[in-house]
Amino acid sequence: MRFPGQRKSKHYFPVADRAAQLSLAGVEEPAYRTHVVGIDQTLVDIEAHVPEDLVGRYDLSKGHSLVLAGEAAEALYEELREQRLITQQFAGGTIGNTLHNYSVLADDPSILLGVMSQDIRIGTYAYRYLCNTSSRMNLDYLQPVDGPIGRCFALITADGERTFAISEGKMNQLRPESVPEHVFEGASALLVTSYLMRCADQDPMPAAAIRAIECAKRAGVPVVLTLGTKWVVADRPAFWREFIDDHVNVLAMNEEEAGALTGCDDPLLACDQALEIVDLALCTTGPSGLYLAGYTDQKVKRQTKHPLLPGAIPEFNRLEFSRPMLKAACDDPIRVYSHIAPYMGGPARINNTNGAGDGALAALLHDISANRYHRFNVPGSAKHAREFLTYSSFAQVCKYANRVSYEVLVKDSPRLHHGLPDREASLEEAYWSR
């Protein structure tokens, strides 16, 4: 486990005794390790530059997003591959992206539950999914299926217009019995998305998601929900408020999804409303940065040293140096809010907006896992005088999440290739730089 942000030396903790030379530094294998579990619709984003007539031949509407039947999707893929029109194939899925980024940041394992084609050819979309996924992500529990995983085609014509064709394949065929309960033992969080509950009636995925949530609850593992798009929420806002109230501890969303859920256009007020049904809410607001809202106990609140910010709730960031707690763990819970503007004002050129929110959530998950890891390996530390949810304060988590979002925005892929340059070095790096 790497610890998020720059820390003083007393907060360094060994990741593992992986090199003989490290015995000189007195490295010992940690007594306790942790991981994050996620359940997802496994899919691949396929980008191709195509002639105008191809869009029409597959009955697609130029510039729009349409569902493509299985046989047509397979024919389209084979044509794109044979004509060498494909420019990029990225592993996708909001949960898959988040778990990958978490494993890159924490240098620790995550476990993905979902489906995977049982017959994989080198160079195809399923192969690319595996190639673009961190080796720290455990894919051993994927359920094999006879057929393709999900595919999202982005077809770019000469005028730069993008036409999207989506084929779900077998991505919603995860069965409840393919969700093993033992993977939740020692986990720091279960990550789910609203897309899992928006499937055809005959698809088993919703039941598999509910089983995963029930397993997490029995293991005392916090449930984290990321909202898909505002349209998913806007279709059934009352259903989602009840679902979140019953099952979810941490909610991640953007300002549009927050508005659809709560009816509040102001992201700060939307976060405040969300705290009626969750313990912690993360809301990304594009060029305005991001908000984090949650609970802490009155006895352990900490005043900020940053300038107080105006807003719908005056001086709302006054207690942002406090650390988040589950509301049920507080004797006298109080609400805490924090906000941060985009890192360095945002990138001069944005290469990719897909996955910036997933990157921010990966940073939050890293901080939650770091706290659990530290609490079990150093139980007597003053850091754990109370049952906190994260290792860092609201303000520090915002700073870290903001930095990871920036890294995604300046890349062509929603998945990180390397850790952050200002992240704390691992013990090996610290040792060899002496």
Image (cartoon, rainbow, N blue to C red):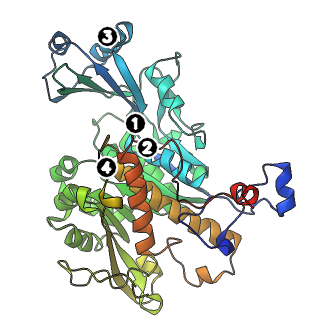
Asked if 358 appears above or below 77 in the picture, the reply is below
The residue that appears at 39% across and 25% down in the rendered structure is: 88
Which mark is on residue 194? 4
Q: Position of residue 433 (x, y in %)?
A: 72, 58
Alpha-carbon span between mark 3 and mark 1:
21 Å
Is the residue under label 3 in contact with that under label 4 (CB below 8 Å)? no
Which of discs 4 and 2 lies nearer the camera? The answer is 2
Q: Quadrant of the N terminus?
A: bottom right
Taking depth in this image into account, of 234 and 430 the one nearest to the observer is: 430
Is the residue under label 1 in contact with that under label 2 (CB below 8 Å)? yes
Alpha-carbon span between mark 2 and mark 1:
6 Å
> Of helix, strand and loop, which one carries label 2?
helix
> Of helix, strand and loop, which one carries label 4?
helix
Which of discs 3 and 2 lies nearer the camera? The answer is 2
The residue that appears at 30% across and 73% down in the rendered structure is: 275
Residue 189 left/right relative to 198: right
The residue that appears at 38% across and 53% down in the rendered structure is: 405
Q: Amino acid at mark 2?
A: Asn
> Of helix, strand and loop, which one carries label 1?
loop
Which mark is on residue 92? 1
Query: Nearer the N terminus, badge 3 or badge 1?
Result: 3
Query: Nearer the N terminus, badge 4 or badge 3?
Result: 3
Q: Position of residue 194 (x, y in %)?
A: 31, 49
Is the residue under label 1 in contact with that under label 3 (CB below 8 Å)? no
Q: Quadrant of the C terminus?
A: bottom right
